[in-house]
Amino acid sequence: MNGPAPAVPAEGRAAPGRLARLAGLCGPAFVVSVAYIDPGAFATDMAGGAQYGTMLLWVMALANVPAMFVQALSAKLGIATGRNLPELCRDHLPRRVSLPLWVQAELVAAATDLAEFIGGAIALNLLFGVPLLPAAAVTAVVSSLLLMLAPRGRRRFEATVAAMLGVVLAGFAYQVLPSGSLAGVAGGFVPRLAGTDSLLPAAGIIGAAVMPHVVYLHSALTQHQGADGDRREAVRASRMDIAVALGTAGLVNMAMLTVAAATFGGGDPGGLQAVHAGLGQVLGPGAAVAFALALLASGLASSSVGTYAGQVITAGFLRRRVPLLARRLVTIIPAMAVLAAGVDPTRALVLSQVALSFGIPFALVPLVAFTGSRKLMGDLVNRRLTTVAGVVVAGVICAVNGFLLVEVFTG
């Protein structure tokens, strides 16, 4: 007869379980990462690559660091307190401060939805010839259906958003190969600028390193993690989640820039419709379809995430939940108005990014202050060096966005 099976060491049994727990805590960062490859990023990255080649790749790589840092603080805030950033603002700030914060946060969410609806509408127009106004309505309906997966089906929502991120990545991977855009990529990571003209797009890339609506959202996605277990393990899992998700988003942005550099190098491709046409002429119809599909996936996913963030903002600041359909109807009105007025949709995308710049300090300052409070964070409070780094990151990004706003409004 066979004897009893040899005992498995305790650490050997624990390892798979620990890995499974860590994997189970991952997912929120993939929802957040969609904000970094939204249709506004398409417009900005393609223009930057066309005008300056791969020279700004080092700026993109550098900008990913503060993005990861800020999202790590937001995730940790939710894990440590069991509350999200809007709830903490409501509970710990005077009403005369929290109410204006709520107003600007709602405006930020509305600006986000404007960009995403327009991006999805452009993609449907490119793929199927649907006029922009009905295409925006279709985008709203489909993204609403996606949003119904959250929060009760949050894991399915996270998986769906991650799959759409994969579609965007695959779309640009497909374009990278025939464009030969990998040539000269290494030189793009050497820090340099082409005079003052390239300073503005470089500042735009750095300024987009923080998207204020997902700073609010990330703390909500993690606020129930670690409640019945090891909070430090949940924080470690969130860092791994952020590194993979935002790293992937960074690769997508770099792919956009390198494809534009190889396809339109030295020229201005114009709006997203012109980019689509140019890709078709230079790389073939397959590349044009891949671009439009990637734009559609980006618009649908980021629209869902933007509306989800808006729900978190309203519920957190006001203790009220707005029905999904009502919020969707309200947020689609500005996009429909812009398209009906005949405004250049790509220009509207760029201006929406300017609006987001206004909201950055109002999200970052409370985030750094709350994560530096031992009363709120307990043993997960920021170390002094982390708080100093948070202040520096917040100051630099706010200064860069201030510079961008001055340039936009003064020409």
Image: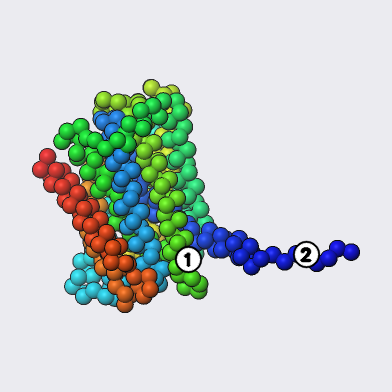
Going by the numbered disc 1, the residue's amino acid type is Glu
Which element carries disc 2, helix, strand or loop?
Answer: loop
Q: Position of residue 32 (x, y in %)?
A: 39, 54
Question: Of residues 219 and 191, which is closer to you in this image?
Answer: 191
Which image quarter is the C terminus in?
Answer: top left
What's the mark number on residue 188? none
Going by the numbered disc 2, the residue's amino acid type is Ala
Q: Position of residue 107 (x, y in %)?
A: 25, 57
Question: Of residues 121 and 247, which is closer to you in this image?
Answer: 247
> Which residue is under mark 1?
233
Category of crowding for the residue at label 2, using alpha-carbon neighbours closer than 10 angstroms: few (below 14), some (14–19), many (at least 20):
few
Residue at position x 31%, y 45% in the image: 62
User: Gap between marks 2 and 1, in whole Å?
Assistant: 32 Å
Residue at position x 31%, y 39% in the image: 58
> Which residue is under mark 2?
5
Residue at position x 27%, y 43% in the image: 205
Residue 382, by quadrant, is bottom left
The reply, left or right, for residue 124 in relation to residue 201 is: right
Number of dots carrying numbers: 2
Whether residue 210 is visible: yes
